[in-house]
Image (spheres, helix red, strand yellow):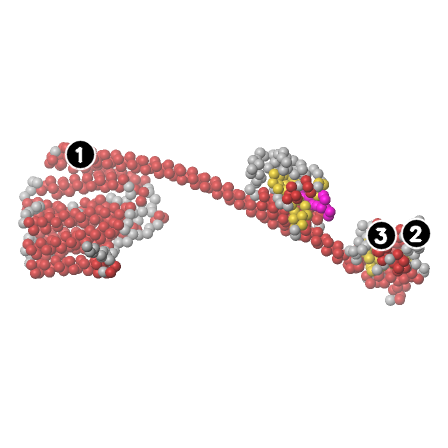
């Protein structure tokens, strides 16, 4: 048994194009072909029953094609625009009814409706159009619900009563000729009324999308009014042949409706284009509903006289029920909208509170980051550790308010930690503690404790508040520990010991900056000492002495203050090295450095000039006092080198040359050194172990 293969439309583009109603040119060609066929039928078959039957069938096809175009427009949209095209399709469907009745009359040779009744059916196309005019604007989507259908139901009642009052009821008491004449006149008035109603609706419409729809509706109604006026004139004068050929004219409203629906595209109108509702709009809507009820009441008398009170009472009851239901729904939706707005306002308030909290938290973090950056910058600019230890408490007090803490450094031997900087009322009481007393130094990482008595609490901490200890590690070496603790005890769960969400990263950053700064300061101090100190004696070297002497000489010249220079040289120190060895000589030089440091003031500078030669600069010291100081140094050195019991050697002595600043001769560094060196040479020449004062005038004469 063979099975037929399904038809694949993509393989048949002609069949696929036949069902395509989105191309205006293709649909227009279909309408032209159908109207041409209609004209050809009249030309070939005449205006008799056969020709009129073919023409009526083609009119039905044109009407169905226009309905398909309107339905396609309905499928492309939603909300109020969808209701517009639905009522527009209903209007085309009403136009289909008289065409079907005419075709049945021609085929079966039976008169179903009279010509006056046929006119009544044709004029019913205006009922959906009147209902369209009562639709809200396209952008007002909140009302596209039951309220619109209830309003349309009441409008439909009024339209139905009006049509029945002006068309149906009078026909029952008139002759056919009089009824036809009346209906022709009323249909013309109806067309004018519909155009006027559309014009009024356009005047009060501000939405671009709604105006576009109303313009298309106006085109359709204008074509219908024109065709109706011409057709009524032909029927009024009984031009039978022209009436038959005018079936082509009755196609024009259908063609216009199809093209209006086919060329329409949904407008993307923003919500900002919608106009806010005013009190007058609500008042107008309710007054319109009251007017609807009043019209129903005015038409009731005619209906009661014609068909009795039962039908009229039923219509009034239905209108009142619809009106009541509509008001109830309006109140319900307004109440729900109020509740939704209150809920949205509460959510907005909550979101605003949350955003404000996050913003404040971000600002606090930004301030903390700025303070951390300033702390690092200040520490890098410090010239010494003491200066850094004065800055650290002040900055950490601002960075961690409500806390106490200390910075403790390990000793060189790493066997104890000593507090160097403290802040807060609960600063650690133990200034010196063992590294084993701090869990952070034990583990090599941060240690957080929630507070209270616990075995994990560091013993070096003073208070019982929550704390965090961070090791100060730089270049892989532990330098000390940074301890921070809260001043107040706050109950916390041991399973979640975090103090503050921002504490740990800030404390870690602060510890890194402090450790790096202290390491750099230590390295800087070590390099500075190596650059200006003699490694053997601990005294300043020759380079530092020259810079210091130049600076002090300029100040003495500017302020006219005295300045003295002592140049020392050990007597026969080479014999001491040869006899006891260079190790003993180095020990004696180290002890000599201690003697010189203890023999001068804090403002004086003692340096190793080279080998066993030394220079002492005495600012603001006259030459008499400098001479006395030199004699005291000679005596101390000689006493320090006096042999102890059991030792046999001559004591080490020193020769000293003294020179002083003078405005006339010794007013430069080279001149001072020259005078001091000549005095030292004179001391050597006179037998050593003595102090000789340079004669400035003789030196000037020789120069």
Q: Distance between the Cα atoms at labels 3 and 1?
A: 131 Å
Taking depth in this image into account, of 90 and 256 the one nearest to the observer is: 90
Identify residue for label 1: 314
- Relative to 681, is 315 above or below? above
Q: Nearer the viewer, residue 295 or 269?
A: 269
- Report the quarter where the N terminus lies: bottom left
Numbered disc 3: secondary structure? helix
Disc 3 to disc 2, C-alpha distance: 18 Å
Give residue 633's position: percent from left, percent from top: 88, 52
Q: Find out whether the residues at labels 3 and 2 contact each other: C-beta distance under 8 Å.
A: no
| Crowd rating for badge 2 (residues with CA inside 10 Å; few <14, some 14–19, many 20+) | few
Name of the residue lying farthest toward the bottom:
703
Q: Nearer the viewer, residue 560 or 519?
A: 519
- Name the residue tied to disc 2: 647
User: Tag 1: Cα neighbours inside 10 Å, few (<14), some, or many (≥20)?
Assistant: few
Residue 591 - label: 3
Q: Quadrant of residue 330?
A: top left
Residue at the image point whose x is 38% and y is 39% from the top: 341
Question: How far separated are the C-alphas under marks 1 and 2?
Answer: 146 Å
Instruction: Residue at 22% x, 44% y: name it.
Output: 131
> Is residue 208 shown in magenta?
no
x then y, percent, for residue 108: 6, 49
Q: Earlier in the sequence, mark 3 or mark 2?
A: 3
- Can residue 302 be seen here? The reply is yes
Q: Earlier in the sequence, mark 3 or mark 1?
A: 1
Write down the region rendered in magenta. Answer: 406-416
Instruction: For mark 2, give the secondary structure.
Output: loop
Asked whether, in this view, residue 668 is left or right of residue 211, the answer is: right
Front disc: 3 or 1: 3
Tell which circle, 1 or 2, labels the residue nearer the N-terminal end.
Answer: 1
Q: Residue at the spot x=90%, y=52% of the render?
A: 641
């Amino acid at each position: 048994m063979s099975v037929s293969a399904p038809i694949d439309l993509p393989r048949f583009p002609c069949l696929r194009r036949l069902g395509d109603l989105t191309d205006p040119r293709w649909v227009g060609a279909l309408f032209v072909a159908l109207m041409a066929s209609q004209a050809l039928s009249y030309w070939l078959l005449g205006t008799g029953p056969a020709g009129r039957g073919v023409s009526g069938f083609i009119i039905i096809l044109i009407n169905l094609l226009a309905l398909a175009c309107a339905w396609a427009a309905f499928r492309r949209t939603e909300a109020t625009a969808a209701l517009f095209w639905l009522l527009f399709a209903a209007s085309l469907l009403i136009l289909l009814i008289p065409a079907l009745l005419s075709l049945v009359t021609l085929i079966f040779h039976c008169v179903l409706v009279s010509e006056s009744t046929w006119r009544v059916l044709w004029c019913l196309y205006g009922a959906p159009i009147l209902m369209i005019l009562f639709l809200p604007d396209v952008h007002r989507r909140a009302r596209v619900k039951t309220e619109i259908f209830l309003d349309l139901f009441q409008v439909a009642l009024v339209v139905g009563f009006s049509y029945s009052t002006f068309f149906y009821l009078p026909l029952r008491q008139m002759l056919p000729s009089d009824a036809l004449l009346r209906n022709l006149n009323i249909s013309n008035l109806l067309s004018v009324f519909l155009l006027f109603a559309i014009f009024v609706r356009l005047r009060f419409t501000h939405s671009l999308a709604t105006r576009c729809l109303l313009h298309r509706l106006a085109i359709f109604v204008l074509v219908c009014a024109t065709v109706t006026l011409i057709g009524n004139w032909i029927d009024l004068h009984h031009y039978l042949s022209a009436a038959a050929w005018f079936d082509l004219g009755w196609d024009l409203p259908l063609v216009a409706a199809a093209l209006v629906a086919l060329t329409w595209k949904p407008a993307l109108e923003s919500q900002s284009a919608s106009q806010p509702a005013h009190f007058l709009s609500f008042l107008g809507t309710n007054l319109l509903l009251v007017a609807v009820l009043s019209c129903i009441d005015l038409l009731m008398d005619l209906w009661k006289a014609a068909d009795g009170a039962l039908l009229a009472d039923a219509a009034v009851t239905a209108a009142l029920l619809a009106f009541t239901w509509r008001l109830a729904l309006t109140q319900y939706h307004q109440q729900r909208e109020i509740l939704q707005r209150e809920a949205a306002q509460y959510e907005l308030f909550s979101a605003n509170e949350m955003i404000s909290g996050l913003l404040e938290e971000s600002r606090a973090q930004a301030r903390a980051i700025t303070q951390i950056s300033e702390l690092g910058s200040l520490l890098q600019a410090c010239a010494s550790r003491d200066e850094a230890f004065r800055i650290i408490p002040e900055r950490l007090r601002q960075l961690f308010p409500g806390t106490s803490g200390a910075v403790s450094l390990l000793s060189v031997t790493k066997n104890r930690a000593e507090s160097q900087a403290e802040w807060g009322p609960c600063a650690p009481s133990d200034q010196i503690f063992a590294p084993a007393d701090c869990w952070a130094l034990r583990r090599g990482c941060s240690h957080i404790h929630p507070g209270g008595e616990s075995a994990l609490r560091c013993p070096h901490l003073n208070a019982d508040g929550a704390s965090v200890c961070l090791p100060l590690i730089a270049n892989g070496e532990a330098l000390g520990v940074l301890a921070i603790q809260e001043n107040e005890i706050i109950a916390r769960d041991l399973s979640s010991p975090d103090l503050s969400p921002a504490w740990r990263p800030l404390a870690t950053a602060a510890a890194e900056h402090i450790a790096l700064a202290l390491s750099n300061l230590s390295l800087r101090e070590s390099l500075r000492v190596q650059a200006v100190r003699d490694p053997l004696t601990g005294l300043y070297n020759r380079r530092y002495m020259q810079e210091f002497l130049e600076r002090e000489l300029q100040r003495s010249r500017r302020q006219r203050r005295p300045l003295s220079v002592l140049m020392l040289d050990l007597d026969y120190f080479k014999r001491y090295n040869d006899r006891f060895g260079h190790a003993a000589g180095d020990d004696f030089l180290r002890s000599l450095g201690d003697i010189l440091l203890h023999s001068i003031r804090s403002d004086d500078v003692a340096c190793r000039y080279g080998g066993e030669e030394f220079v002492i600069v005495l600012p603001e010291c006259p030459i008499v006092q400098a001479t006395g100081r030199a004699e005291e140094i000679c005596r101390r050195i000689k006493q320090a080198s006096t042999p102890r019991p059991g030792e046999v050697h001559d004591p080490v002595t020193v020769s000293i040359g003294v020179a002083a600043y003078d405005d006339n001769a010794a007013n430069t560094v080279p001149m001072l050194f020259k005078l001091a060196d000549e005095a030292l040479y004179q001391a050597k020449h006179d037998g050593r172990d003595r102090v000789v004062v340079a004669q400035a005038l003789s030196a000037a004469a020789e120069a």
